[in-house]
Image (cartoon, rainbow, N blue to C red):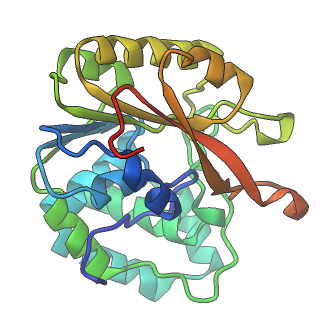
Amino acid sequence: MSKLPRPFLKWAGGKSRLLPQYVPYFPKSFTAYYEPFLGGGAVFFHLPPQRAVLRDVNPELINAYCCVRDDVEKLIELLQQHAGHHNKEYYYEMRARQFSSNLERAARFIYLNKTCYNGLYRENSRGYFNVPIGRYKNPQICPEQLLLAASAHLQNARIEVGNFDLVLSEANADDLVYFDPPYHPISATSNFTAYSRYAFGEAEQIWLRDTFAKLAHQGVKVMLSNSDCEFIRELYRDFSMFPIAANRAINSKADQRGKISELLIVSYAVDNL
């Protein structure tokens, strides 16, 4: 089981723990797979290897995926070097440092992801990563077997920086598109939608719904995750919605971390339900 591909990054809102609940809603078959909000890629890694197009607006994230796909052995060597030097001083030195080569950028990105607070990715208005160091006794900075398995799974994937609506001109009938956008906030304390300097507010949620509807009209199989709230339910009222029980992973108040309801929204008929 350890050789099965799964996310090599920690990612806020990652879907690894929710996959058992998602499985009944995946279409029985599809041709190509598109994931325009890549993040940790849990759904992509869960599905059988196939032709895929993976996108995100975060260029550092996309660069890391490309290096895992194209040059994983050299990337592992660089990560092992980071692991050998890791301490608080080294973390902040790497956080402040910029590299020019793609491999060094990817190794820095993964190192920071494995050692920062909660694996959170956050940038300031200037586009600089600014998350403090996490409290880990033994962070897994270089999960070699995980990276090798991910690299093999990524071989047939096109990976690039881009907005989610690019899929409109590419996906065909019987393809599968999975949208996992920054969730619409359900309260003031959960109003965290900017994993990068690019905000994702109500206007972007409406833009995404319009994209979802256009794809569905073209016969594309579309699946989307979002928060369970009146705004999202109203946006997607013409489509099938299924509640998913999820843990609140990021909240500053420990007593407010617990089970919440999310929505899984699909454009197609779900078999056996």
Q: Indicate left or right for 158 with 160 as reference.
A: left
Q: Indicate left or right for 253 with 88 as reference.
A: right
In front of the other: 170 or 48:
48
Q: Is residue 43 above or below residue 115?
A: above
* Image quarter hosting the N terminus: bottom left
In front of the other: 231 or 13:
231
Residue 102 seen by the camera: no
Q: Position of residue 262 (x, y in %)?
A: 63, 43
Q: Which residue occupies 24% across, 23% down?
A: 220
Q: Position of residue 14 (x, y in %)?
A: 51, 55
Residue that extends furthest to the front in the rendered view of this protein? 272
Q: Is residue 107 above or below residue 21?
A: below
Q: Which residue occupies 36% across, 52% down?
A: 43
Q: Is residue 52 above or below residue 102?
A: above
Q: Indicate left or right for 148 with 8 as reference.
A: left
Q: Position of residue 196 (x, y in %)?
A: 55, 37
Q: Position of residue 29 (x, y in %)?
A: 18, 43
Q: Which residue occupies 18% across, 62% down?
A: 153
Quadrant of the rendered image containing residue 263: top right
Quadrant of the rendered image containing residue 269: top left
Q: Indicate left or right for 113 with 234 as reference.
A: left
Quadrant of the rendered image containing residue 8: bottom left
Q: Which residue occupies 66% across, 65% down?
A: 117
Question: Number of callouts in the render?
Answer: 0
Residue 200 seen by the camera: yes
* Image quarter hosting the C terminus: top left
